[in-house]
Amino acid sequence: MRYPRHAFAALSLLTLAPAAHAAQLSPMEELGKALFFDSTLSEPAGQSCATCHGPAAGWTGPDSAVNASTVAYPGAVAPRFGNRKPPSAAYAMAPPLHVDPEEQIFVGGNFWDGRATGWLLGSPLADQAQGPFVNPVEQNHPDAEAVVAKICAGHHGARLRELFGAAVCDDVVQGYNAVAQAIATYETSGEVNPFSSKYDHYLRDPKRYPLTAQERRGLALFERDDKGKCAACHPSRPGPLGEPPLFTDFSYDNLGIPRNPDNPWYRMPSAINPQGEAWIDEGLGGYLKTVARYAELAPGNRGKHKVPTLRNVDLRPSPDFVKVYGHNGYFRSLEAIVHFYNTRDALPRCEGAASPQPGVTCWPAPEVDANVNVDEMGKLGLTPDEERDIVAFMRTLSDGWQPVGR
């Protein structure tokens, strides 16, 4: 069981505004929102932060067709693609990446591999905001100087100077850090993190906003440490000061997810992906190899990826909208990944790595067959009805829930 004391620490920095007031943004949040949704801030124009992190889809991939095919999103320059499913930009208030002294595991940071550490700006969200602007498979600016010049010369420049001082655009480092800070401030706002799901209403007043019988069964299984074991990494209870749960402990795990052959990264030119089809996603371990003080810990973290929040895990703009799950989008439904958690080690391994369909009778080998989590998943013994109960509970985590008749 893992409940790092850091799991709720970042919330102390956030004003937990009621959902009704989520749209009331501060000037800094307004600037961050404007930057987040501005599709001219790529080279060439056409890609904003929201291109990969759409609110209607829970602040993750908003294009159903992309989710159903490549999973990874195309960048501003065709035909370049990223290498992973877009993580949620909501409820991502992680602490800086560090080794938890009690658990001796890495906690914090953003991106699936933790490389937005928060060591630069004190905030993983701010560090993360700087990455896509200069990533050639995303917004494709040549450098930070080009980003700052474009923003300062455009219609955001006046507000940036107003909030950060007249000289903010005269220094590239100061300007780029200010841009990231504004975006991160918006991403911690009540608009992005309204805590307005059915489960939030239930926590505030369980008698007035009760869960259904199936949802209650699912919650009980979710929290059981001898069966569902979900809450071991996705804490579901309020924090010590009553903070709403974020449904992530900000740690990293290798879930044993198979390679996703639909990932276009394997087919990127060698200038983008030098390893081609041989590329293996080492996750946190791959990043740690590049950090001198942690390089010796890389093998023990190979294949581990960030534990995502489960908030908005099933939020979608329409019933037929396709959402995908896992760092590489291998799973095409919530039911599929829950079944994988339950049966990964109970079913035999099979050849190939096509995305699972209903009635799966075997699972392909993990992409990285080391450091696989066997403590909280793999052979849970859940019945099909119990799997459905857990899925029903997770569907109570979508923001924007309205009680019937209101």
Image: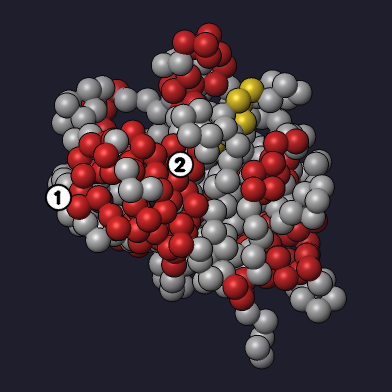
State the residue at coordinates (39%, 59%). 31
Q: What is the secondary structure assignment of the residue under circle 1?
A: loop
Question: Label 2 crowding class (10 Å Cα cut-off): few <14, some 14-19, many 20+?
Answer: many
State the residue lying farthest toward the bottom: 405
Mark 1, Cα crowd under 10 Å, few <14 / some 14-19 / many 20+, is some
Q: Quote the CA–CA distance across marks 2 and 1.
A: 23 Å
Relative vertical location of residue 343 with respect to residue 386 in this rendering, above or below: above
The residue closer to the viewer here, 49 or 2, is 49
Q: Residue furthest front?
A: 166
Q: Position of residue 324 (x, y in %)?
A: 44, 53
Quarter holding the N terminus?
A: top right
243 vs 250, nearest the viewer: 243
Residue hosting label 1: 44
Can residue 124 be seen by looking at this rendering? yes
Counting residues from the N terminus, which is met first, the one under dot 2 or under dot 1?
1
Apparent side of residue 111 relative to residue 107 in the rendered image (left or right): left
Q: Residue at x 26, y 33 (%)?
A: 266
